[in-house]
Amino acid sequence: MAETIKPYVTQLREEGWCVVENVIPADVVDAVREEVETSEADYNDFSKEHGRWERNVVSFMPRFAAHLANERLLAVIRELLGPQVRISQTEYKIRPPHYELVRAYHSDFPYDLNQKWHIGQPFPNAVIGITTLWMLSEFTAENGGTWVVPKTHVDLRNPRGKEDGIGDRNPLSGELQATGSAGSVLIMDSRIWHSNAENPSAGKRTAVVVRYAPWWLNLELFGVNTATIPGEVFDKLPDDVKLLYEHRAAGREPTVWV
Ligand SMILES: O=C(O)CCC(=O)C(=O)O
């Protein structure tokens, strides 16, 4: 493993999360943020008209998409998931100013106990999902930096476990808010207990969540989260990003994986 990624991989294994700085360079992050913020309305309009799982979110943000195979980030993810990974889910995570929220702690796919397609408790001691939150505005404790509870990726209980008595709306011992400059990426073992946070500030907290999965994980979730990318949009993605999304390309024969 390259020395440059060792601290991230170690923190992920031991604590269940880490922040990688400068994944999107400072000189382009403002343009990427603007694209993401302005495209959300187009995505919502499209989805209202055609259905929620019709068009993949990433189709609306080509500038952002260009960074998804960032070498340093993927090297970290591959240490945890194995060499062949795909993107399972992509979603806008923009918190408006003065957004109020009681915590809602959970683990992510495939460990989200509120979804039908989850692994049952006790979770196996294996990393089967990586959740990344791409910070397109700075994340602070004042504007809704994500809550995480370090080391809970190896806790056999879960905030959504009916028998576990934790309470997903409660502050939890050891919780902290992940912070970082715009262009950083919060990487989490998808088992870790995490939650969105209130944003009492006057500005938007803009992010995109991108979840990575090992190649062998079933991502055909009965029509949910399987939205496709139009072929002509897919064709314009960089080759290394195509590899992550080929299973969502509409009207294109698989070429990258064969
Ligand atoms: O937006 C955030 O800070 C957290 C999002 C989250 O919990 C999730 O996408 O699973």
Image (tube, rainbow, N blue to C red):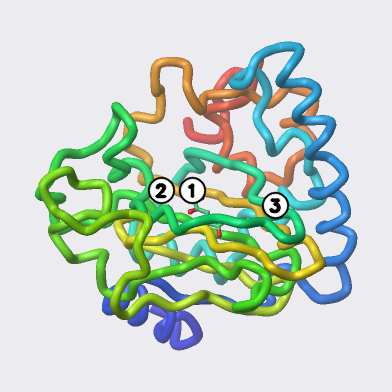
Residue 203 marker: none
Residue at mark 3: C-beta within 8 A of ligand 1? no
Q: Which residue is mark 2?
A: 84
Give the alpha-carbon distance from disc 3 to disc 2, as whole Å: 29 Å
**Mark 2 residue type:** Gln
Give the alpha-carbon distance from disc 1 to disc 3, as whole Å: 16 Å
Residue 94 marker: 3
Give the alpha-carbon distance from disc 2 to disc 1, as whole Å: 14 Å
| Residue 183 position in % (x across, y down) | 71, 70
Residue in the foreground of this view, choosing between 118 and 20 = 118
| Residue 216 position in % (x across, y down) | 31, 37
Q: Residue at x 44, y 87 (%)?
A: 3
Sequence-wise, the earlier of marks 3 and 2 is 2
Q: Quadrant of the image for the N terminus?
A: bottom left
At numbered mark 1, what does the secondary structure look like: helix, strand or loop? strand
Q: Is residue 119 above or below residue 46?
A: below
Q: Which residue is mark 1?
A: 211
Q: Residue at x 72, y 62 (%)?
A: 205
Q: Crowding at label 2, few (<14), some or many (≥20) Cα neighbours within 10 Å?
A: some
At numbered mark 2, what does the secondary structure look like: helix, strand or loop? loop
| Residue 104 position in % (x across, y down) | 42, 53
**Mark 3 residue type:** Ile
| Residue 111 position in % (x across, y down) | 28, 45
Q: Residue at x 37, y 75 (%)?
A: 175
Q: Residue at x 47, y 16 (%)?
A: 223
At numbered mark 3, what does the secondary structure look like: helix, strand or loop? loop
Which of discs 2 and 1 lies nearer the camera? The answer is: 1
